Amino acid sequence: MNKPIRRQDGERGMIMLIVMLVMMGVSLLGLGSLMVVGTDIRIAGQYRNSTQSFWAAEAAVQRALWEMRENRSFTGDVAAEAIGNYTMSSASVERLSENLVRIVAQGRALGARRKIEVIVNVDTVFGAALNVGGDITLEGKPRISTEGVRLNGDAYFDLDAGTPELNVYMPSGATLNAVGDTESLNRIEKEPMDLAAVKLKDEEWRTMANMATGDFFIDNDGTYGNTDTNVTINNLNFDDVTPGPNGDRVIFVDGDLTLNGSIAGTGTLVTTGKIICTGGFVTSGTPTVTMVAQDDVLINFDTNAQSEINGLVYTEGDYELHGKINFTGVVTAFGSVGVQNPSQFTNNSDPNYWYTYSPAYNILTDPIDVLSWTEIEGGSS
């Protein structure tokens, strides 16, 4: 028979020690895992708070931009606002120069803080009756309302007797020559318009082009931007133009558009080339017309007829007007402006009017251009 093996007391103690060491190791591993998990949770929480404070600062920037869109002269504080239970946002707005504004926005979430600095240009090139990126020549004794002319280049005016007070906003180095009734002419120095800041972006041109529907989106080869399409329309009546989803009547031409004869109704013309109005061009009633062209806008009204038009003109080329016209609206040309014959210009930059009658107005006149965006502070407090 086998005899039972007897263990020595020392052997039993060794087994107990090994068991205790194993249990201790498992416990240490568990404690270490708990510490790692706890650290990960803290890191995740800090990241969450930092991210929330960043987006809170971004929200404050957008609130400040909204305030400036409502009032370009706005400065001061955008009050702190609670976002959720423990996230706050606030901003301050200060003017650096006539056209430049600095926004400092801050977001907080528990112990995290993020701060953003944004520099914006708040200039607009739709503030005067005529806004000119180059030189301007006004002949034929035209009349211009007191909102006047703003330009970056030189000016020559042949003014009518009895011209109302006319303000001319221009850089200090530009030349102003005038004949006729110059008593009411006021030269006011103003920074040059920042044309790059207000120049339409490619996607904005496409947005306006896509407002046209059906046969009134005119592009021969279907390749946007080739400017290969030249169209002539005789006696345009916008009532004959197919309205878009919002009721807006828009004609888009990927090239030059020539209008012969008369124009009537309310609508918008958008071209990647020129807009040319000729052939005894007159208006029927008082149409409201928005003209947006990447090239020149050339208008030759019938000199024997007095036409009236409500107009909003944006051209990245030159603007020329020949003939008699009572024009109420705003003209902005990046190039030169030439006006002949006894025309009259009256400023109408009322947003409520143009929001109603021009689907392109919001795109054309946004005065806020973000020049730089920098995070200047981030961390915990």
Image (cartoon, rainbow, N blue to C red):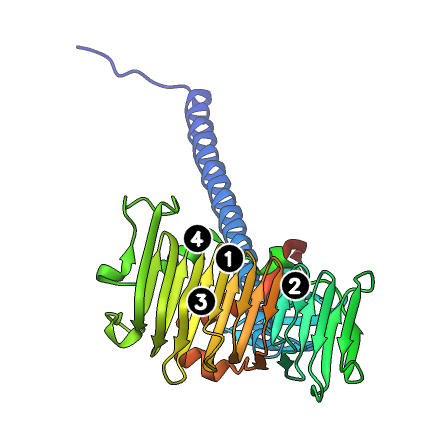
Question: Image quarter for residue 90?
Answer: bottom right
Question: Image quarter for residue 337?
Answer: bottom right
Task: Please identify the residue farthest to the left as the structure is shown.
Answer: 1
214 sits left or right of 229 in the view:
left
Is residue 358 visible in this depiction of the protein?
Answer: no
- Classify mark 2: helix, strand or loop: strand
Q: Which residue is mark 3?
A: 291
Q: CA distance from mark 2 to mark 3?
A: 25 Å
> Vertically, is 349 above or below 370?
below
Task: Please identify the residue farthest to the right as the structure is shown.
Answer: 172
Q: Which residue is mark 1?
A: 296
Q: CA distance from mark 4 to mark 3?
A: 12 Å
Residue 94 x/y as whole percent: 73, 71
Q: Residue at x 57, y 78 (%)?
A: 343
Instruction: Tell me the number on the disc at residue 273.
Output: 4
Q: CA distance from mark 3 to mark 1?
A: 10 Å
Question: What amino acid is labelled 3 in the image?
Answer: Met
- Classify mark 1: helix, strand or loop: loop
> Vertically, is 376 above or below 78?
above
Question: What amino acid is labelled 2 in the image?
Answer: Asn
Instruction: Tell me the number on the disc at residue 121.
Output: 2
Report the front residue among 267 and 198.
267
The mark nearer the N terminus, 4 or 3, is 4
At label 4, counting other C-alpha atoms closer than 10 Å, the crowd grade (few under 14, some 14-19, many 20 or more) is many
Residue 270 x/y as whole percent: 40, 61
Of tags 1 and 2, the one toward the viewer is 1
Q: CA distance from mark 4 to mark 2?
A: 28 Å
Of tags 4 and 2, the one toward the viewer is 4
- Classify mark 4: helix, strand or loop: loop
Q: CA distance from mark 1 to mark 2?
A: 26 Å
